[in-house]
Structure formats: structure tokens, C-alpha cells
């Protein structure tokens, strides 16, 4: 069973890091305290610290190096504060809203990908698909599935769409774990992924969009059926 960190304690860690940046006790490019020290200082579990750092890393706010620990990104302070605020505010959105936005963004992204993709994009998309299929029956299946979709979004060559998808992905993944979305692998997913790649290769914009609508239809239906105003992350 997957462990799901308490979101309030994860927020505690993120807010603490934001405060350290705001007060100047932590500067862009500096290394954060070790997980154990942060956990003790904030009286939270190390799993909550780890989840907070993973979220911040996903947004590009921090970067983790094997030998050096976790370092704050080399961004201007105002940019970092805005990014952290956005990372915290996204928590208030419900699953159906996130799925709705994901579908809208991905439909535009896949059409642009079919129009704008380069030979290098095709190679990257093929590699992402190979990893997705290689991990289809492992615990990495959902994250590799998202990585494939992100490769398609990058092929659109619209950085705003790609960035917006990247922003909502961590919280969509958390809902996936909470509701056990796609907990049973379906071979149809592999076929649909390959068809998306075929449409992109052939520059078939409308075919790619139609295949994506089919691919995400069950997710839209699931979100509408299982969502209500009380289904916020806890």
C-alpha cells in the first residue's frame, strides 16, 4: 500500500522554506539543511520533508545532487517566492478541475506536437514510450505514463503549455494514488500511446487530438463520478 504524506505537514515544510528565503536566512544557490534536521526542527516526519522537497524539485524550485544534498535554484528571490506560492495554492483544486485542465492543455499540446515536432522530438517521445512500456507492470507505471505525455507536450514547442502541465502533474499524481486511478494495467493504454505517436509522426493533428480524447475519456468519467467539493487533498 502506498504511503500518502499528510498534506498539511508537507505544506509546513514548504512554508518554512519560503519563510527562510523571504527573511534572507536562505539564499538562491544555498544548500538546504538535511532531511533529518528539517524534520526535527519542524516536528514532522522525514517522509513529509521528503515529499515537500520532491514537490519543490518537480517545480524547479530546488535541485537535489547525490553528493551535495538539496540546493535552492539560482533564481531571483521574487521568482522563487512566486513559484512556491503557486506550489502551495495548487493544493486547493479538486480532482475534476485538475483533470479538466489537463485534458484541455493536452489536446492543444498534442495538436501542436503533430504540427511542430522535430526529428529529435520523435526520438525523445519514442524513448519515453519505451520506458513507459518497460515499466508497465511495475510501481513506476503511472509516473512513466506521465513522462510520456510530458514528452509529447515538449514536442509542441509551446513552453507555457508544457510548464502548466508540469505544474499540475504532482497533484494529479497524488490524486491518482488517493483514488487508485489506473490501478489495474490495461493493454488498451499501450495501443493508444502507440497511436498517439503514429499520429504525431504523420503530422495528423486532428487524428492525434481525437485519439487523446479517447485515451483520456475514462479518466474524465472517473473524475466526474468520484469528485465532490469535499474531495480535497488532506
Image (cartoon, grey):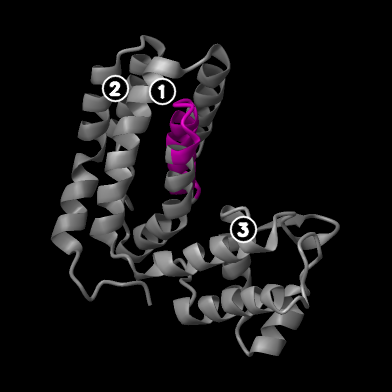
Mark 1 or mark 3, earlier in chain: 3
Mark 3 or mark 2, earlier in chain: 3
Residue 87 versus residue 234 in the image, above or below: above
Name the front one of labels 3 and 2. 3
User: Residue at position x 58%, y 69% from top?
Assistant: 52
Query: Circle 1 — which element?
Result: helix
Residue 152 versus residue 147 in the image, above or below: above
Count neighbours of disc 1 (C-alpha within 10 A) and say few if under 14, some if 14 to 19, many if 20 or more.
many
Most prominent secondary structure in the magenta stretch?
A: helix
Is 155 included in the stretch rendered in magenta? yes
Say which mark, if any, is on residue 113.
1
Residue nearer the viewer, 30 or 147: 30
From the top left corner, tell me how far across and down residue 86 is, in percent.
48, 63
Say which mark, if any, is on residue 59.
none
Pointers 3 and 2 in contact (CB under 8 A)?
A: no
Count neighbours of disc 2 (C-alpha within 10 A) and say few if under 14, some if 14 to 19, many if 20 or more.
many
Give the CA distance from mark 3 to mark 2.
35 Å
User: Residue at position x 42%, y 60% from top?
Assistant: 171
Say which mark, if any, is on residue 208.
2
Amino acid at each position: 500500500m502506498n504511503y500518502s504524506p499528510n498534506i498539511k505537514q508537507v505544506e509546513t515544510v514548504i512554508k518554512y522554506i519560503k519563510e527562510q528565503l523571504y527573511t534572507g536566512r536562505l539564499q538562491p544557490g544555498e544548500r538546504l539543511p538535511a532531511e533529518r534536521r528539517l524534520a526535527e526542527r519542524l516536528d514532522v516526519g522525514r517522509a513529509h520533508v521528503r515529499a515537500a522537497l520532491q514537490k519543490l524539485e518537480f517545480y524547479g524550485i530546488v535541485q537535489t545532487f547525490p553528493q551535495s544534498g538539496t540546493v535552492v535554484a539560482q533564481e531571483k528571490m521574487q521568482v522563487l517566492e512566486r513559484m512556491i506560492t503557486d506550489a502551495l495554492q495548487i493544493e486547493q483544486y479538486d480532482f475534476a478541475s485538475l483533470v479538466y485542465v489537463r485534458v484541455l492543455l493536452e489536446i492543444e499540446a498534442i495538436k501542436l506536437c503533430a504540427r511542430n515536432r522535430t526529428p529529435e522530438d520523435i526520438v525523445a517521445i519514442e524513448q519515453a514510450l519505451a520506458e513507459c512500456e518497460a515499466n508497465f507492470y511495475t510501481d513506476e507505471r503511472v509516473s512513466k505514463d506521465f513522462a510520456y505525455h510530458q514528452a509529447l507536450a515538449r514536442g509542441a514547442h509551446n513552453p507555457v503549455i508544457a510548464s502548466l502541465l508540469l505544474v499540475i502533474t504532482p497533484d494529479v499524481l497524488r490524486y491518482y494514488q488517493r483514488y487508485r486511478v489506473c490501478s489495474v494495467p490495461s493493454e488498451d493504454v499501450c495501443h493508444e500511446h502507440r497511436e498517439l505517436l503514429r499520429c504525431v509522426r504523420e503530422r495528423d493533428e486532428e487524428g492525434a487530438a481525437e485519439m487523446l480524447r479517447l485515451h483520456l475519456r475514462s479518466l474524465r468519467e472517473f473524475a466526474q463520478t468520484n469528485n465532490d467539493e469535499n474531495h480535497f487533498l488532506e
